[in-house]
Image (cartoon, rainbow, N blue to C red):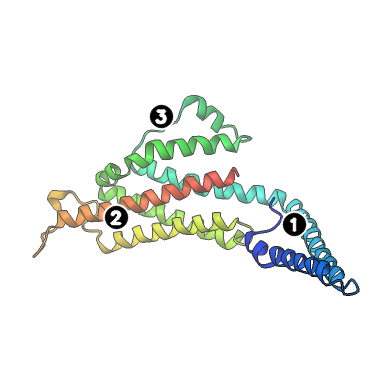
Amino acid sequence: MRLFPDFLWRKLVIPLVIIAIIFLILAVFIPWRGLFTNLATTFLGILITICYVDFILREHETRRWAQAMTLIKKRIDTFANVCSSQFRTAFKISFNIFDEEALDQALDIDNPSGIRREMIRVTENIIMPSVVAGVHKLTQEDWIKLVRQLQLTYERGDRLCLAYGNRINPECFSLIMKVQDEINSILGLYSILPDVIGVPDDDLPLKKTGSAKADKRAMEKIISSKIKNILESAVSLLRKLDE
């Protein structure tokens, strides 16, 4: 556990240390009845007191919230896993992609790190390289299912942030919001062009100018990029939970 966040080092610790050093230097060159020595000692005493009190209070708070934080981390873990699994299902990637030995470890509920490592491996090495082809193959029926799942994932993120936002690591909180932003963008694109996204090329509506097929490819490219961002955020969340 770090003694102070970065901004406190900049705003509190470093300024107090600099002031104390200045007074000590002045005490050497201007020995005015020990005034500068006393001032330096006072500032150092303030700093030590602040460090000690802050450490004790945070240690107490950490212990008091230890069990609750374990449960909150499980919910974040589930959210990150869902972010990846929803696309594995949408792209019809078989469950057999999971390594048997790794899967045995992953099924050990007392070893969450094993589950995370396997999900990270599958996400980075199998799901992410399949995104572009997977998006292109999605049918209208597939999209209806995926849209509903994305809505559920977004709502799950909302519940996490609303219920535990003041206890979630700020970096994890930011990653959850990034996932939500990308989901929202995908849902927005789908709502604008539901008669293009997922429609077979031969059944695309005719346009007076331009090509509906070109529009579809452009949407697929954008959606693929956003899905990759979601998967990257999910992987980052899983890694953060093991720090």
For numbered disc 3, what is the local secondary structure?
Answer: helix
The residue at the point 61 percent across, 48 percent down is 73
> Looking at the rendering, in which quadrant would you find the C terminus?
top right
- Cα–Cα span, label 1 and label 3: 45 Å
22 or 54: nearer the viewer: 22
- Given the image, on which type of amino acid does mark 2 rest? Ile
Residue type indicated by callout 1: Arg
Residue corresponding to mark 2 = 222
Say which mark, if any, is on residue 96: 3
For residue 43, say whether it is visible: no
Residue 58 numbered mark, or none: 1
Residue 243, above or below 52: above
Task: Choose between 194 and 101: the one closer to the eye.
Answer: 101
Give 110 or 130, whichever is nearer the viewer: 130
Q: Residue at x 30, y 47 (%)?
A: 142
Label 2 secondary element: helix
